Image (cartoon, helix red, strand yellow):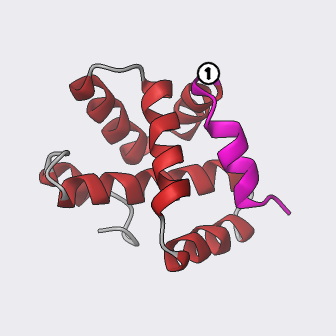
Amino acid sequence: MVKLEEVFRSCSNPWVAEAALASMGGVVAANVRAAAARNGVADGAFVAKLMREFREHSCPAVVTMTEEAMRRSELPVLTGLQHILAHALILRALMGQVEPAAMLALAPEYA
């Protein structure tokens, strides 16, 4: 069973994070790419930053929800990454750092 720690270890590296984002695809990845472009940083560096923020500031309930989703997934690292990034984008939208309209297209569990 893959642990959340493995997602942090892997995706805190900008090169790995960029490759994982490309593999993940979808709406969350597109929103992360757009946010990275608005911030003037490479996709992988932005993902690595979001990973560090999540690790340092996430609440236990969100961590538990992410771990449960990973346990049910055939691709646990990508699932964990997707949950972490979606959560980070929602927090940034609440803080006014991401376009709120972009959040409408996130997976149902985050909308």
The percent position of residue 110, horizontal first and vertical second, equals 36, 68
Q: Which residue is rendered at x = 32% and y = 29% of the image? A: 36
Tell me the SS state at disc 1: helix
In front of the other: 109 or 98: 98
| Three-letter code, disc 1 | Trp
Q: Is residue 100 left or right of residue 34?
A: left
Q: Which residue is rendered at x = 75% and y = 49% of the image? A: 6
Q: Is residue 70 left or right of residue 111?
A: right
In front of the other: 35 or 105: 35
Residue 75 visible (yes or no): no
Is 77 one of the magenta-colored residues? Answer: no
Residue located farthest toward the front when viewing the structure as drawn = 56
In front of the other: 37 or 28: 37
Q: Which residue is rendered at x = 40% and y = 60% of the image? A: 87
* Quadrant holding the C terminus: bottom left
Residue 78 visible (yes or no): yes
Disc 1 crowd, CA 10 A, few/some/many (<14, 14-19, 20+): some
The percent position of residue 106, horizontal first and vertical second, equals 33, 57
Q: Is residue 86 left or right of residue 80?
A: left
The percent position of residue 29, horizontal first and vertical second, equals 42, 39
* Quadrant holding the N terminus: bottom right
The percent position of residue 61, horizontal first and vertical second, equals 52, 80
Residue located farthest toward the right when viewing the structure as drawn = 1
Residue 86 occupies which quadrant of the picture?
A: bottom left
Is 11 one of the magenta-colored residues? Answer: yes
In the rendered view, would you say 45 is above or below 1?
above
Q: Which residue is rendered at x = 27% and y = 31% of the image? A: 34
Residue matched to label 1: 15
Magenta-tinted stretch: 1-15
